[in-house]
Image (cartoon, grey):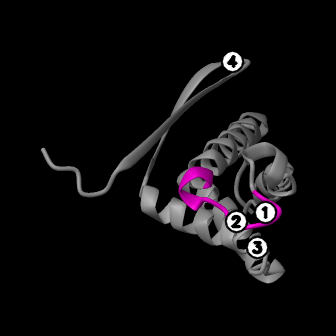
Amino acid sequence: MEITEPTLRVTHSDQSGNFMTTISGKKIVYDMIGRYLMSNAEGRWDGSEKAQRHIELCEFYLNCFGIDKIDEYEAFEAVHEATQELTDNLDTMIGFPLKGRPDYDDLEPKFFEIFHKIAVQTLFDYLKDEPEGEDDE
């Protein structure tokens, strides 16, 4: 059996047990992460692209959970805010160099693992706390 598009599985646990999350389209996610990391590199810093790529990553996770950003903006804000701990501390959290050329092949999976864990946990918590039977307005 040939797999043409890899599937990425990351397991993490929280207080209520283990979650297995599967995200298809590893290339799509890693492309977004690569562009995000490039916008942070010395000599290539681009605040506008950094912000845009962070938004795209957050929207990707909302879409994976079937959440529409416009209808449930609070979910987007929750993920965006929670993942800022990572995006504001790339040097200490994944070893992103403040000077010199980053090794993107090394940094992309590190970034993904942390971003994924934070985003998925935030969305699980958001959905868990949402009142049952609440109609979309």
| Contact, mark 2 vs mark 1 (Cβ under 8 Å) | yes
Q: CA distance from mark 2 to mark 4?
A: 26 Å
Task: Say whether disc 2 or disc 4 marks the residue closer to the N-terminus.
Answer: 4
The label shown at residue 73 is: 1
Quadrant of the frame with the C terminus: bottom right
* Residue indicated by mark 4: 16
Q: Quadrant of residue 102?
A: bottom right
| In this view, 61 is above or below 137 | above
* Residue indicated by mark 2: 69
The label shown at residue 50 is: 3
Q: CA distance from mark 2 to mark 1?
A: 5 Å
From which residue to which does the magenta span run? 97-107
* Amino acid type indicated by mark 3: Lys
Q: CA distance from mark 1 to mark 4?
A: 26 Å
* Amino acid type indicated by mark 1: Tyr
Q: How many marks?
A: 4
Q: CA distance from mark 3 to mark 1?
A: 20 Å
